[in-house]
Image: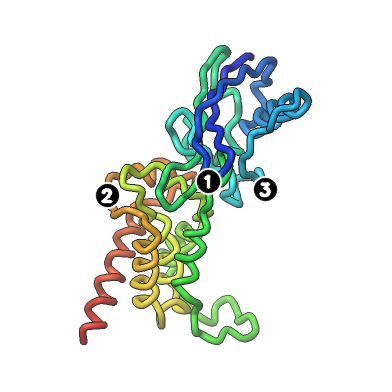
Amino acid sequence: MNIILRVWRQKNTRARGRMVTYRVEDVSPDMSFLEMLDVLNERLTLEGDEPIAFDSDCREGICGACGLVINGLAHGPKALVTTCQLHMRSFSDGDVIDVEPWRAEPFTVIRDLIVDRSAFDRIIQAGGYISIPTGAAPDAHAVPVPKADADDAFDAATCISCGACVAACPNGSAALFVGAKITHLGLLPQGQPERHSRALNMLEQHDAEGFGGCTQIGECTAACPKGIQLDVISRFNRDVLSAISHRGD
């Protein structure tokens, strides 16, 4: 199959970016989207042009590094997959495909399709550590956790910090990301001592980074490659309100 790519090219953070058109021929439907970009970059390198800069690491849908906006959709047209898991059989011969970086004020473009997502790291750092001294690994049954709580905590912990929720949100909110990080600790016994202060500190850092407010539109969960649901935002809001209430005592 032959496709036409329109790719965002930007030399650095201060440079002005633009869409550049490339024709890619003899694309195998079994290629992943990133493999197709690898083929294009090999050709560009042989022709003496600058290859397209994009992030990737594990290419197994685990690390969250490969986020791209493809035809206006974070990670592309398939649900519950990352960009590296998207295959070219999802497109048709002759398709024109737009490829852009995440669009959000805190995610500044470093080069081409690579954005700075260190704001996520600072939000996690603001949450701090748990103070429970864990010591050696306890027996599996030593700290009882209701199965429903354990399942919900595990579902929230599947967040890979890719940023698709922010890229999809019209407000540029990272509430789904923050909610997932708060929920997976807040549902477990070990996360209780700092549960409410953690939520408040992470919210304050979220706002300081320039992310927008959540208005429960739901684009975030639709774009999330791990299918994290909006209920984590409700838990996040509940813990924040509790923290504010306790702080006023």
Tell me how far mark 2 sits from mark 3, CA to CA: 31 Å
Q: Quadrant of the N terminus?
A: top right
Where is residue 178 shown, x and y percent of the image? 40, 61
- On the image, numbered disc 2 is attached to which residue? 216
Q: Which residue is mark 3?
A: 58
Residue drawn at (55%, 78%) of the image: 141
Badge 2 or badge 3: first in the primary sequence = 3
Q: Of helix, strand and loop, which one carries label 1?
A: loop
Q: Position of residue 85 (x, y in %)?
A: 60, 37
Q: Nearer the viewer, residue 91 or 148?
A: 91
Q: Is residue 67 left or right of residue 126?
A: right
Frontmost residue, 178 versus 126: 126
Q: Which residue is mark 1?
A: 13
Percent of width and height locating residue 17: 50, 34
Q: Which part of the image, by quadrant, shows the C terminus?
A: bottom left
Query: Quick one: label 3, few (<14), some, or many (20+) residues within 10 Å?
Result: few
Side of 21 where 156 appears, left or right: left
Task: Name which residue type carries label 1.
Answer: Thr
